[in-house]
Amino acid sequence: MPRTPSICHLIQWPEQSEASDTYSVIDPAHLKPVASVPDMDTPDVKQAISLAHTAQKHWARKTARERATVLHKWYQLCMHNQSDLAKIMTIECGKPLAESMGEVAYGSSFLRWFAEEASRAYGDVIPENAKGRRLLAIKQPVGVVAAITPWNFPNAMIARKVAPAIAAGCSIIVKPSAETPLSALAMAYLGEEAGLPPGVFNVVTASKGSAKRIGNEMTENALVRKITFTGSTAVGKLLSKQAASTMKKVSMELGGNAPFIVFDDADIDAAVTGCIASKFRNTGQTCVCANRVFVHSKIYDTFAAKLSAKIREMEVGHGLEPGNQFGPLITSDAFDKVVRHVEDAVGKGAKVLLGGKPHGLGGNFYEPTVLTGVTNEMLLAREETFGPVAGLIRFETESEVTKAANDTPFGLAAYFYTKDAGRIFRLSEALEYGIVGVNEGIVSTEVAPFGGIKESGLGREGSKYGMDDYMEIKYICIGGIKETLDA
Ligand code: SIN
């Protein structure tokens, strides 16, 4: 029986699938397989694209209110199933359950937000430039969208792309990360329950080995009019280059190297709390994680001691066990990178205040770590560590720390703590980043624009701007209009 990319067919796989291969989804805490899913390849994506192309024409003809009704229902179903979605997420990505619950609520908030935004995709009536003419600018869906999403937010990064696409009248094919296909399939199942017609939201699961071929098809197939990606800068550059062959619209949410700056006038306890939230959320595996913690020399030792004391109280373990605040790293490659960064820092003179070694639980668990004496030359400060390691860098002046904070090709998120009102404005404007948190360690929300500058990417997700990336503006010039009544 021919397979469609409809979620029911995917979920009932293998009975209704043509894909002959499967691959295992691994729980990163136990390192044991928990499910197997189809390992799809180029013919599957081609078929999904073709069905999405047909479905999009019908979907775009629905009224904004009709599209919003489905998104609202989907939001309600996701929230109704919040704890199941959270368990699935924890099992495949290792995130502590409380964080997974939070992510499902966060992801679902995009479904609700863009349900509301669907009706507000206004165009313009432009004052005419000559008699006998009327000028309009209308917004139309770009068409078929392809999305490639990461494992660190298996639900929210899909919702943040799918919701605006669907609200705008696009159809979308998502290739979730090889590590976390189950959250994507569960979302799609609920989407279908909510009334999404077949072909509007499609999930293509694939192992790491097939991912490149799928990315090639998504970027080079002329029926796809937009590609949206969250992941590393290296892959984002490659996809952008490939997408140029058919001149697709692109949105890229790429790597970061966030500075987290604590001035000597800051509320130190609030800065410690913010630093833990920003640096250690998802065991340090977010693109907006603090990566370089700059602390003013006058408060350096106090801050370091308070930070270590608080982290020492936190528990490491399987995300499904209550009370654990740190899970494992996603893969052995991720684990190896953390080991390499800590060894490099210690080799160049950093001191271990806390942790600094693999956790006794083994596998991909690494001890939450605080290092002092970190400098800008260490790998920890040059690359995104993506792990539970806070490296503290000492600074003396505002101008020195601003220069150091901007000394990176990346520009996603930056944070600083101060009570000085003038500095709040000065520094917010001087930091070369798409997102700035002032006296806050977590700033993501569906109502505000998320995205980076420089090599951290292109486009904005969420907020009133979030649908723009899924729409084209068409200019319509109507001529030959007689200007006198009864003419
Ligand atoms: C990311 O890591 O890119 C997403 C983080 C967020 O949405 O807060």
Image (cartoon, rainbow, N blue to C red):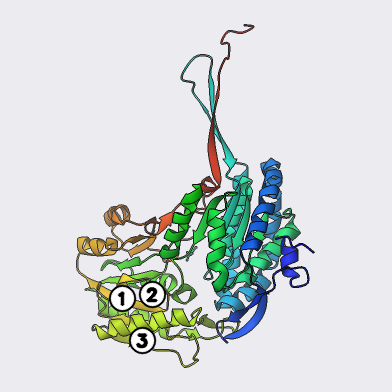
Within 10 Å of disc 1 (Cα), the crowding (few <14, some 14-19, many 20+) is some
Identity of the residue furthest to the bottom in this view: 360
**Residue 478 percent across, percent down from the top left:** 57, 22
| Chain-order first, disc 3 or disc 2 | 3
Q: Type of residue at label 1?
A: Leu
| Chain-order first, disc 3 or disc 1 | 3
| The C terminus lies in quadrant | top right
Residue 314 drawn above or below residue 419: below
Which of discs 3 and 1 lies nearer the camera? The answer is 1
Q: Type of residue at label 3?
A: Leu
Residue under label 3: 354
**Residue 416 percent across, percent down from the top left:** 33, 63
Question: Which secondary structure lies at badge 1?
Answer: helix
Within 10 Å of disc 3 (Cα), the crowding (few <14, some 14-19, many 20+) is many
Residue labelled 3 has its Cβ within 8 Å of some atom of ligand 1: no
Residue under label 1: 379
Identity of the residue furthest to the right in this view: 1
Question: Which secondary structure lies at badge 2?
Answer: loop
Asked whether residue 438 appears in the rendered view, the answer is no
- Residue 455 is left or right of residue 331, and the answer is left
**Relative depth, front residue between 222 and 392:** 222
**Relative depth, front residue between 263 and 278:** 278
Q: In the picture, residue 234 is in which quadrant?
A: bottom left
Q: Type of residue at label 2?
A: Thr
Callout 2–callout 1 Cβ contact below 8 Å = yes
Callout 3–callout 2 Cβ contact below 8 Å = no
- Which mark is drawn over residue 385? 2
Residue visible at 63% across and 42% down in the picture: 119
